Amino acid sequence: MTNQGDKLMFKPLSACVLSGALLVPLSVSAAPTDPVVIINDKTITQQDYDNYVKARAEQTRSPHVKHDVLVRELIQRELLKQDALNNNLDKQPEFVHKLNYMRDSLLMAMAMHDYLEKHSQDDAALRRLYDQQVAHIKVPNEYKVRHILVKTKKRAKAIIAELDEGQSFAKLAKEKSTDIGSAKNEGDMGWITKSTVGAEFGAAVEKLAKGQYTAAPVKSEYGWHIIQLDDLRGVALPSFESVKDRIRSAMQNRQMQNYVIGLRKQADIKIINKH
């Protein structure tokens, strides 16, 4: 008998109720054909075990699972499979149809994977596409603004007159703006872009210099605004590294579309039933 250092024995499984399963000691350096468990004369090899672990990790994204749990799952799968075969479930039309569908789906997935592997894009190609797209983007500005909102144009003009006399914009916003949310912050709306506000509001902001307020009230669906520009900056574009995976995915989608278009052009296709 070998010593314990030569063999790694399975822990006792709580699933011993799954009768018919014989656990086999697993060598630390097991060969692919070495048995892991024997179930009703069916041998599950180390290769079967490794394939199951890999497939399970890809499907569940849970690579770290205890060995005894994996063996218990393999036993359960094999017992259910054997029972299904004993009951000729593999001969039922529903099974045959589903098996054919799954086979076709797997072949389709493998064809796409094989094509993309043969036509993979390196980081340099992704970078070129990123640079091309960035070159055509007009970077918008962000504006840090305050505003005072009132119901009437007359009221707005009166506030502008106070500002012209040197009154604090922040103080007047806190005291007189009907926009409660920004009034408590002295009219501060934070950073905005033209696309996040109404057309009239955005157009007025775009004309202001830093530190300047609108000389005339600005109308919107909410009332009349006096707007002050505190600061402005260009919107930061996402870095190449932050969008590289999305670019790769977009390129692969385009590659697959072109690949399928090419296959359709080469194929002899006759659509018989058009309804």
Image (tube, rainbow, N blue to C red):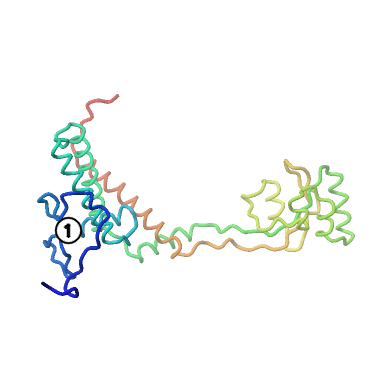
Determine the residue positioned at 40% across, 64% down.
Answer: 127
Given residues 121 and 129, the one toward you in this image is 121
Identify residue type, mark 1: Leu
Which quadrant of the structure image shows residue 138?
bottom right
* Quadrant into which the N terminus falls: bottom left
Instruction: Tell me if 163 is positioned left or right of 98 in this view.
Output: right
Q: Is residue 220 left or right of residue 140?
A: right
Is 7 left, or right, of 142 in this rendering? left
Q: Nearer the viewer, residue 260 or 3?
A: 3
**Rendered-image quadrant of the C terminus:** top left
Instruction: Count the numbered circles shown.
Output: 1
Locate residue 260: give its quadrant.
Answer: top left
Residue 129, percent across and down? 40, 60
Q: Relative to the observer, which residue lies in front, 263 or 31?
A: 31
Give the structural element (helix, strand or loop) at label 1: strand
**Where does residue 90 sit, x and y in percent of width and height?**
15, 37
Residue at 17 percent across and 52 percent down: it is: 21
Residue assigned mark 1: 23
The crowding category of the residue bearing disc 1, from other C-alpha atoms within 10 Å (few below 14, some 14 to 19, many at least 20), is: some
Is residue 38 shown above or below 99? below
Dividing the picture into quarters, in which one does residue 88 lie?
top left
Q: In the rendered image of this protein, does residue 163 appear above or below residue 149?
A: below
Percent position of residue 250, x then y = 38, 53
Residue at the (27%, 48%) spot, across then down: 259
- In this orientation, which residue lies closer to the viewer: 3 or 120? 3
- How far from the left and from the top, in percent, is residue 57? 30, 57
